[in-house]
Amino acid sequence: MENKIIGQLIENEVRRQRLNVVDFAERIHCERANVYKIFRRNNIDIQLLANISRVLNYNFFEEIAKNYSLADEPSEETEKQTYERNAVSNFLQFVPEVLKEMGKEPLIIGGTKELMEGRDELPDFGLPKYALSFTIGNTWTEKTNAYTNPLFIIEPFPDAKDIKFYSIVNRTKGTRMIDIKIDLKSKEEWRELIQLVFTTFPDQRF
């Protein structure tokens, strides 16, 4: 068996059964955000694991007995990678659907700091004069490895205490890219955020 932690085994079974994370959270009487925390755990309360085993009709105790490595301590990097994978998956699951339902073009760019470094304009993907993108990181400095360019105007929204997206405007080209903060949200929460983007920039033909 592949070396995994118990949280990853639970996540794999949830995905195999094609359960929505929100539905799974309701079945085990838990907040949605806590489900993602469970997916990253190497240890778990016995009663909670018993409840999860019942809900999924899967004996996780038997798996642990057969493979003690399920209880191994995960590294910090592994936890970070798991979170980022879940966050990207969550974003790509809901945002294209939301955009289509809102009558918008469901075209999204996955950004990296390498796309921005050394450039004097926004990345050209053959798009109109706007783009909706996402990069991994909580702050623009984290996203871009502290990269700055005087040709870019970078503004966080809605405010410095609760940044949900960034506007990156090219001074010379007049192009704007909206960079969405990757996070774990329900479909309705993503809808509210995307609507906030459109409300903030009503002049943009997203």
Image (tube, rainbow, N blue to C red):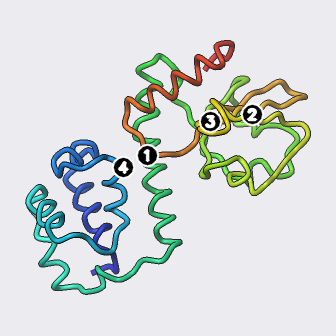
Q: Secondary structure at mark 4?
A: helix
Q: Which residue is mark 2?
A: 155
First along the sequence among labels 2 and 3: 2
Between the residue at mark 2 and the residue at mark 3, the CA separation in whole angstroms equals: 9 Å
Between the residue at mark 4 and the residue at mark 1, the CA separation in whole angstroms equals: 7 Å
As drawn, the residue found furthest toward the top would be: 203
Relative to 135, residue 151 above or below: above
First along the sequence among labels 3 and 4: 4
First along the sequence among labels 2 and 1: 2
Q: Would you say 97 lies left or right of 174 here?
A: left
Where residue 27 appears, as percent x and y from the top left, is 15, 47
* Discs 4, 1 touching: Cβ within 8 Å: yes
Q: Of the residues tagged 4 and 1, which is closer to the observer? A: 4
Q: Which residue is mark 1?
A: 184
First along the sequence among labels 1 and 3: 3
Local packing at callout 2 (Cα closer than 10 Å; few below 14, some 14-19, many 20+) is some
Q: Which residue is mark 3?
A: 165
Between the residue at mark 2 and the residue at mark 4, the CA separation in whole angstroms equals: 28 Å
